[in-house]
Image (cartoon, rainbow, N blue to C red):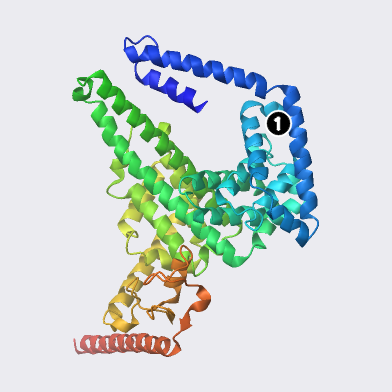
Amino acid sequence: VREIAQCQETIEHMGGGNSTNPMIFHLNLQLSGLTSTMVAMRTHLLDPKLLRKIFALYGWAARWMLHLKNQGAEGSRVLAALPEYFASDMANLYILMNRFEPIMLRSQPMEDVMRVVMALMDSSMLKNASLRGQLPDVLNLALPVASIPSPEHMLVTQQCFTKMLIPRLLGLYVEIEFGENQFYNKFHTRYTISQILKFLWQHPVYHESLRAYDRDKMIRFVNMLCNDAVWLLDEALKHLEDIRIEQKAMSAPEFKRQNTFARHRREAQFMQLQRMTRSQMNLAHASIQMIGYMSQAYKEPFLSSDLVERVAEMINYYINKFNGPRVTSLKVKEPKKFGFRPKMLMREIIRIFLVFAEDPTFLKATASDERSYDSSVFAKAAANFERKEVLNASEMRKFRAVLGKLEGLAKEMKNEDELLSDAPQEFLDPIMSTIMKDPVMLPESKVVVDRPVIKRHLLNSTTDPFNRSKLEVADLIDMPDLKREIEDFIRRRRREAAEGKKRGAVVGGSSEKKE
């Protein structure tokens, strides 16, 4: 099927079936042969009697694997020792049948298969990360059409799903990051997980399941979710800049004067760029949507001390990106063809921002982001949102109120930075060059860093950033004496500033009396 699609696309780019290009004749012969082969294979492989027997076989295999799992430790040990093709064949069958015979697939009993799929998402049952990455595609087949809320659905009514599905899905979301050759495949797996979670989130039972999820694991999941949102959207926006350049070049007279082969080659490259951009935009949008609906009901993990700065920087960056001086580089013809819906995207990001802005720690993290927070850009953003009706009237009032708070905080923090600008070098974190709040020593490299900074690093890589040795949070060595010295230094500087301000006020008052 893939070869047929590629062949058809090549013929189209070379001018279609009526083209005088001699290569078209050979491509049409190749397309005819591929089509005949596919029809012959489908006739045999999609025979209804054969399919019913295959579904019966895999239904029996699923029940047998569930039986093993229910036998306790010994059964689970046997299940974990089964060849991987037991899982891969089952996954491939259901994925392919959804493509070629969806009606027959929907008529088959799927509960046992889905329970096995959920069990095999656990890395203790199935080590192969690439294979586990296919399992959400099978689970996705159980969702109702259009993923409408379904209180009677098996994923909502059966305790085995409501208790274990969230841990399995979120665990796989994180673990797929560390599989071999998973860089691009992981985004497909995570997109599928996001669609399943979107359906589950419509049912309150899963809100409770998420709240019961292990806090440390939840923070790792949120960190990966933010990483995806940032990387995917950033890559897609870079591609939009390239698309803008290509659109200008391909509409110029010089392009039309090129020979047919050169034009078709460039058009094919442009089509590839379009597909890549649209895919990344859709994946980024799914990640942002997930942050949006989860934060509405459970924002604590996003605002934890480990992640609040990361989340603030992410939102600041995109407010700046969509409203800053380089925004014109994102203006392309027919943006919807590339999955680019800036108004919808910005609305979702700002609604997330307003939810988090209720927390003073988030506001402080936003105002302290020297890279992306700019009060003038945020003011311009407010004007843009009002002019383009991105937000409703109530949301606009909240947004402007938050901007006022941020400006005040930014001034306070600038004064604080100036106050502490002469801090000794040993008080500064070597990674971020900021004054440490909770200094700790790394056991192998003996470097002293700020605890929040190193914890954030460990969310992405469990290694010492200075010598790549293995490192866990539990290995960090507290430095109470240094912490006390830093706190004394900050108190002394604040006291000196307050006394200086008081003396200035007294001198000013005396001058006024003399006058």
Q: Residues within 10 Å of mark 1 (few under 14, many from 20)?
A: many
Residue at 66% x, 21% y is 44
Residue 198, percent from left and from top: 61, 46
- Residue at image mark 1: 105
Residue 23 placement: quadrant: top left
Q: Quadrant of the C terminus?
A: bottom left
Residue 265, percent from left and from top: 30, 26
- Residue situated in front as seen by the camera: 434 or 500: 434
Horizontal side of 315 relative to 302 (left or right) equals left
Residue at 75% x, 43% y is 62
Element on which disc 1 rests: helix
Horizontal side of 223 relative to 46 (left or right) equals left
Q: Give the amino acid type for the residue marked by disc 1 in the picture.
A: Leu
In the rendered picture of this protein, how many numbered marks are placed on residues?
1
Residue 444 placement: quadrant: bottom left
Residue at 77% x, 60% y is 74
Position of residue 260 relative to residue 395, above or below, is above
Say whether residue 105 is visible.
yes
Residue at 47% x, 72% y is 471
Residue 433, percent from left and from top: 32, 73
Say whether residue 151 is visible.
no
Horizontal side of 180 relative to 44 (left or right) equals left
Horizontal side of 410 relative to 347 (left or right) equals left
- Residue situated in front as seen by the camera: 460 or 253: 460
Residue 215, percent from left and from top: 60, 66
